[in-house]
Image (cartoon, helix red, strand yellow):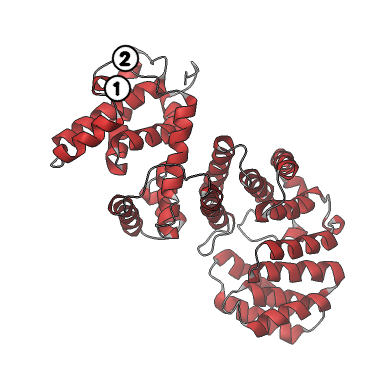
Amino acid sequence: MTATGDETIESIFQRERGKILATLIRALGDFDVAEDALASAWEAALRQWPVEGRPDSPQAWLIRTARNRGIDEIRRGATAHRKREEIQSAIAPEEASGPAPDDSDEPSVGDDLLRLIFTCCHPALAVEAQVALTLRTLGGLSTEEIGRAFLVSPVVMAQRLVRSKQKIRSARIPYRVPDEVDLPERTAAVMSVIYLIFNEGYSASSGETLLRETLVLEAIRLGRLLCQLMPGQQGPRGLLALMLLHDSRRAARVTPEGDLVVLEEQDRTLWNQGQIAEGLRMLHEELGAHPPDAYAVQAAIAALHARAARASDTDWRQIAALYARLFVLGPSPIVMLNHAVAVAMAEGPREGLRLLDQLVVSGVLHGYHRLPAARGDLLRRLGRREESAAAYREALALVGSDVERRFLQRRLEHLD
């Protein structure tokens, strides 16, 4: 890819890093060697380009330079003999010293990116490892950044990354796009990882802040990438629409002091209309091409919120119906909880509370703070103050997020 004249070296590297790394992992056969080789090529670019001028194809230059350095490193290592056959089978011998191949070819690079995505999200890896490896290789986040985002030490996160790479080597996890028969299931796993990253950024499960913007933006970037690489596949556009519509409310979700603002109290003039328009367009395209899956139905719910100029304009009956549809697609107690809240808004708190109490009796959400928090809110609306206070106290004993804890404490104080 040819860079524009006003792009900085840093911006080129940031834009191309994932594509280059994907190609290097295929060529060199090792995550660590590929990452080290790319870092070495990056250092060389910082030294040489300001002096010698920027190459016509920065991506091809970086691939060639990094690949050659990776080959040299493998040859110097103790496993040189074993690795040499892998190298020769991956690339022609003359390419190591000859002119740069056309590594910027988009279909080839796209194939490499897909291979990397499916390798990082392989079901043989633990979910935590899939998330960490995806953020490290595709997102370019440092070990420290990923650790901070998930509130674990850099040492713990580094160990998680090392174990995942060792698993890929020892289990000989193939670096390829799944066969057509396995593609839908494996694509669903990839989307699940991306959405998990988004959710942890959108509503942090613990810590001092509600939002972890780095994770939200990275999940949206990965969603865009998946849409570009798999334009005809069901799901990616619905997932991207869902994330865009949710994130459009970011500026209104917390006060300047960092306190939570619930949906019905948000200043809707702060919602990002550009993201809403893009999310609605992506949802329309997805529904026009495929039957609605779980992501598309959730995006449709978010779209109903986005279209309501005021909280009182929200079509809660349709939202409740969509949650019922979502439960058919993927039965989940969380969906049941959200359905109960939507029913409470559409038909009144008494009916919603009846559904929530069924969840309490079933015990399926025992220990999940948002169930007693929702009950506390509906009991408050019904004027049952003592029961509401007890529910809020139960939620306070379970909540992990400092922001949500302050919100629940304020609700409890208002009751008192």
Q: Which amino acid type is marked by label 2?
A: Val
Judged left or right of residue 56, residue 284 is right
Q: Quadrant of residue 90?
A: top left
**In screen coordinates, is 324 left or right of 89?**
right
Q: Please determine whether, in this image, residue 205 is positioned above or below residue 380.
A: above
For this rendering, which residue is in front, 129 or 380? Answer: 129
Image point (72%, 46%), residue name: 271
- The answer to whether the residue labelled 1 contacts the one labelled 2, judged by CB atoms less than 8 Å apart, is yes
Q: Amino acid at mark 1?
A: Arg
Local crowd size for mark 1, using a 10 Å CA cut-off: few (<14), some (14–19), many (≥20) = few
Q: Secondary structure at mark 2?
A: helix
Q: Residue sitting at 28 percent across and 34 percent down? A: 37
Residue 199 in the image, given as x and y percentages of width and height: 57, 56
In the drawing, does residue 193 fall left or right of residue 129? Answer: right
Q: Which residue is mark 2?
A: 51
Residue 280: x percent and y percent? 74, 43
- Residue at label 1? 47
- Give the SS element for disc 1: helix
Q: Is residue 8 above or below residue 147?
A: above
